[in-house]
Amino acid sequence: MDPVSDTFLVGLAEISAGLTGLFLVGMIFYIQTGYDRIERSREVVEPYFRAATTITFIAYAIPLFVSLTLVALPIGWSRLLFLVLVLGLAVTDVLTVATVRTVMRVTRLGLLMMMEVIGTAVVALMVILPLATGGLSPDREDLVPALLLSLAVAFLGTCVLALTLFDIARFERSEAPLAVPELPERTADTTDPTDESASDQGTDPLH
């Protein structure tokens, strides 16, 4: 494998940091404005959003911090940090399975299961690839494919989370009662118009 330059690693860290910032801003904005509109599915959607946000943050943190340590610190620190973050990602992914199944059972969103399958497969590849190419002591060239996979699955998770917002909004509207505005009641007019005209004629000073 060709040597990996520091410029490439710094650029990878910058991309991950930029996407992390955008994701953070988007989630904060949705928490402040969007949760108030979720009523029927909030009990199951809120735990899923928390779990999915945690997974996405860890996936973005791997290419961000491991890339920086590969540039600034000895390789041993990068291996240790990569191992800790990948283990955290795997544990969080396993703990999220029950949450995803609950959301699917309530909202019937197949996109979530697809993301769960792809995410699990990517996490497995992130563990296998460095061991297959570098053994127990992978170099920076052996870690780069796993960093790219982590960035890819984090970006995919962000996209799926954004698309899920539209599906949840549609689910919230699917069985909601129509808000039909109430019209003011009109009282029945029992006065005969001919009587009014006759009364008017009787009081006309010209007749």
Image (cartoon, rainbow, N blue to C red):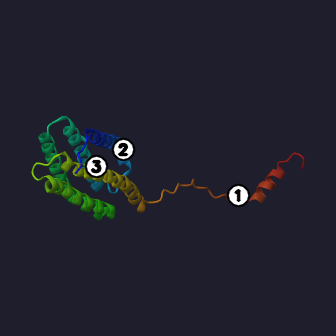
- Which callout, 1 or 3, points to the residue nearer the camera? 3
Dot 2 falls on a residue whose secondary structure is helix
Residue 109 visible, this angle: no
Q: Position of residue 146 (x, y in %)?
A: 22, 51
Q: Earlier in the sequence, mark 2 or mark 3?
A: 2
Instruction: Identify which residue is drawn at 16% across, 46% down.
Output: 139
Vertically, is 205 above or below 197? above
Vertically, is 148 above or below 194? above
Q: Which residue is mark 1?
A: 191
Instruction: Identify which residue is drawn at 61% across, 56% down.
Output: 187
Instruction: Inspect the image, locate mark 2, and give the three-letter code of the amino acid beneath it.
Output: Gly
Instruction: Inspect the image, locate mark 3, and give the three-letter code of the amino acid beneath it.
Output: Leu
How far apart are the two marked residues, 1 and 3, measured between alpha carbons? 78 Å
Question: In the image as oriented, which residue stretches furthest toward the front?
Answer: 2
Q: Residue 25's image quarter?
A: top left
Residue 48 visible, this angle: yes
Q: Position of residue 85 (x, y in %)?
A: 17, 46
Q: Earlier in the sequence, mark 1 or mark 3?
A: 3
Q: Which residue is mark 3?
A: 151
